[in-house]
Amino acid sequence: MYGDMPFGMNQIKIKVATTVKELPAGLTLKFKPKLVTARGRGGDRLRALASAPDGVEWEIENLGLDSATLGMMMGLTPATTGVTPNQVTTLASSDTNRLPYFDIYGKALGVGADDVHYHIINAKLTDGFEAPLQDAEFTKTSTKGEALDWEIIQNETADDLPEDA
């Protein structure tokens, strides 16, 4: 079998509309399909269960603070002023912005010549982001949210994530 032993985190890309950005140092991409479940009880016991897909929860962790990609996911645009070596980039909150839908693409290499791609479809931030500053540590930015759909693609021969993805 191919694609059944993914190893590491090779690449993460975020796509909003037609704009694609790669996280420069992706560490983790996790997702968990959600289910809605109804339980039928009667006679003091469980008699039936019915479950159906209900979206997906996801989480990304990245080394560093990539304000351009974070801004894309939050519906914000970083503003840069000045000229090198005195440029200043500011990402600021706004009470009028609306968080967009976006797609998340992740890639892990396999143990052979294979790889695995995760595609999280119509994602949206639902838990903001964290970017702690702490002693003797690089900042790791984490984002969490939900999405409508997902797919796992297993390639017998490793392939690049789509250019437009």
Image (spheres, rainbow, N blue to C red):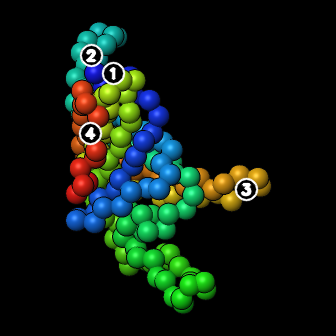
Q: Secondary structure at mark 3?
A: loop
Q: Which residue is mark 2?
A: 1
Disc tally is 4
Mark 3 residue crowding within 10 angstroms, few (<14) / some (14–19) / many (20+): few
Q: Secondary structure at mark 4?
A: loop
Q: Nearer the viewer, mark 4 or mark 2?
A: 4
Mark 4 or mark 1, earlier in chain: 1
Q: Residue at 32% across / 27% down in the picture? A: 113
Mark 1 residue crowding within 10 angstroms, few (<14) / some (14–19) / many (20+): some
Q: Which residue is mark 4?
A: 159
Question: Which corner quadrant of the image does residue 88 belong to?
Answer: bottom right
Q: Is label 2 in contact with label 1 (beta carbons under 8 Å)?
A: yes
Mark 3 or mark 1, earlier in chain: 1
Q: Amino acid at mark 1?
A: Asp
Q: Is label 4 in contact with label 1 (beta carbons under 8 Å)?
A: no
Mark 4 or mark 2, earlier in chain: 2
Q: Which residue is mark 3?
A: 134
Q: Residue furthest right?
A: 135
Quote the CA–CA distance across marks 2 and 1: 7 Å
Mark 2 residue crowding within 10 angstroms, few (<14) / some (14–19) / many (20+): few
Mark 2 or mark 3, earlier in chain: 2
Above-or-below relation of 21 to 45: below
Q: Which residue is mark 1?
A: 4
Residue 157 placement, left or right of 127: left
Residue 111 in the image: x percent, y percent? 40, 23
The disc placed on residue 80 is none
Quote the CA–CA distance across marks 2 and 3: 43 Å
Q: Amino acid at mark 4?
A: Asp
Q: Residue furthest bottom?
A: 82
Residue 92 in the image: x percent, y percent? 50, 77
Residue 69 in the image: x percent, y percent? 42, 63
Q: Nearer the viewer, mark 2 or mark 3?
A: 2
